[in-house]
Image (spheres, rainbow, N blue to C red):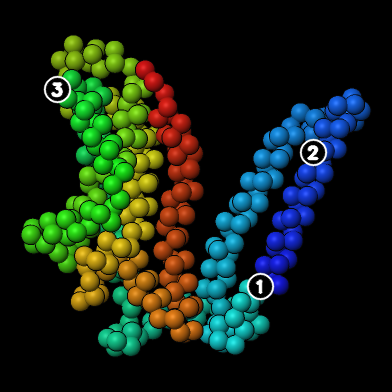
């Protein structure tokens, strides 16, 4: 066990022990009605549980940030440090941008050509965008039908769709692969888009939000002569923009980060069809020291769009998820 890990564990244990001691002192003072009347005393008297939750969440966040910090620092670490001083967060020879430069300029020894990073990013963006747009359209229309249309076996059909969520995705990969091959779409980006359009998770989330839309509003629109498609486009879609944004973000992230299915369906024949995640896996597949920096640099580049997208939409995520619990 490295000294850095030992120090980190010691700090966490010390914080938790200090928190326990603080709780015991505050509870004892409150029981004896000897709590200080100053601002600090009043704060701990009223917000002890909130303070405990904040400290524990801070520890969890710090633990979750460690891999990200290590990855970012490692992407700026030279080959010399990986080979001669592994495990050093601060490289002795300083940080460098050489890994990012090599990522876009270094020659792939198996093909004699530079890694097509830009093409991989474009493929990932095309697939993720198409999956998001088509998935939201299909999921939104299906959710509208399950909530606002009356047809036979509606609840039975929805219950069956929910049951399919317990089936692991790995179990359906072979039938999906056979279907894609029979359709003649293997080794194409369409093979990455079409299988993702039948997801039930997005349908469930959107349906739960639609349940909070007053039925009277829909009936009033129908009495005014509006068709179901017009109601969906002019009333339901604007009201549900927050949940569509949330589900769109989830779909985009899932498609952007998907690795197993693109690896299976695209193979190794044509690298120009690869998504960014497949390319990262290829770069990182070798365990030799000269690929560690490239793998970390490519992973950071892959994470940047998701980080920016999340920062922009984080408020809408909270609004959309909380809104799924509203009932009419």
Indicate the secondary structure of the residue bearing disc 2. helix
Please tell me the numbered disc located at residue 273. none
> Badge 3, how many Cα within 10 Å: few under 14, some, many 20+?
few
What residue is drawn where x is 46% and y is 31%? 322
Indicate the secondary structure of the residue bearing disc 1. loop
Disc 2 and disc 1: Cα gap in Å?
32 Å
In the image: residue 216, left or right of residue 96: left
> Badge 1, how many Cα within 10 Å: few under 14, some, many 20+?
few
Indicate the secondary structure of the residue bearing disc 3. loop
What residue is drawn where x is 33% and y is 17%? 214
Residue 231, image x, y percentages: 22, 23
In the image: residue 321, left or right of residue 170: right
- Which one is in front, 199 or 69? 199
Q: Which of the two labelled residues, at mark 2 and mark 3, occupies the earlier sequence position? A: 2
Residue 161, image x, y percentages: 24, 37
Among the 4 quarters of the image, the one containing residue 135: top left
Q: Which of the two labelled residues, at mark 2 and mark 1, occupies the earlier sequence position? A: 1
Is the residue under label 1 in contact with that under label 2 (CB below 8 Å)? Answer: no
In the image: residue 257, left or right of residue 224: right
- Which one is in front, 135 or 259? 259
Q: Which of the two labelled residues, at mark 1 and mark 3, occupies the earlier sequence position? A: 1
Residue 123 can be seen, yes or no: no
What residue does disc 3 label?
152
Please tell me the numbered disc located at residue 1. 1
Please tell me the numbered disc located at residue 23. 2
What residue is drawn where x is 71% and y is 40%? 52
Residue 158, image x, y percentages: 24, 31
Disc 1 and disc 3: Cα gap in Å?
63 Å
């Amino acid at each position: 066990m490295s000294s850095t890990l030992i120090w980190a564990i010691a700090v966490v244990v010390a914080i938790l022990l200090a928190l326990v001691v603080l709780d015991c002192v505050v509870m004892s003072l409150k029981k004896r009605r000897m709590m200080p009347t100053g601002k600090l005393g009043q704060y701990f008297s009223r917000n002890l549980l909130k303070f405990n939750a904040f400290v524990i969440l801070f520890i969890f966040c710090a633990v979750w940030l460690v891999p990200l910090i290590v990855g970012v620092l490692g992407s700026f670490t030279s080959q010399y440090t990986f080979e001669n001083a592994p495990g050093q967060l601060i490289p002795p020879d300083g940080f460098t941008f050489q890994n990012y430069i090599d990522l876009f300029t270094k020659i792939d020894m198996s093909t004699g050509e530079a890694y097509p990073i830009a093409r991989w990013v474009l493929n990932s963006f095309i697939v993720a965008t198409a999956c998001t747009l088509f998935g939201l359209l299909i999921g939104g229309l299906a959710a509208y039908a399950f909530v606002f249309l009356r047809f036979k076996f509606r609840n039975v059909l929805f219950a069956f769709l929910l049951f399919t969520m317990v089936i692991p995705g790995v179990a359906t990969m072979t039938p999906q692969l056979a279907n894609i091959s029979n359709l003649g779409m293997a080794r194409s980006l369409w093979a990455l888009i079409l299988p993702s359009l039948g997801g039930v998770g997005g349908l469930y989330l959107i349906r739960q939000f639609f349940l909070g839309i007053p039925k009277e509003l829909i009936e009033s629109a129908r009495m005014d002569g509006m068709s179901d498609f017009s109601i969906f486009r002019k009333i339901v879609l604007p009201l549900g923009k927050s949940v569509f944004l949330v589900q769109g973000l989830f779909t985009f992230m899932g498609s952007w980060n998907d690795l197993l299915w693109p690896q299976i369906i695209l193979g190794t024949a044509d690298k120009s069809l690869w998504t960014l995640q497949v390319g990262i896996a290829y770069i990182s597949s070798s365990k030799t020291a000269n690929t560690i920096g490239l793998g970390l640099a490519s992973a950071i580049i892959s994470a940047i769009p998701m980080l920016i997208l999340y920062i922009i939409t984080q408020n809408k995520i909270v609004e959309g998820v909380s809104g799924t619990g509203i009932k009419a």
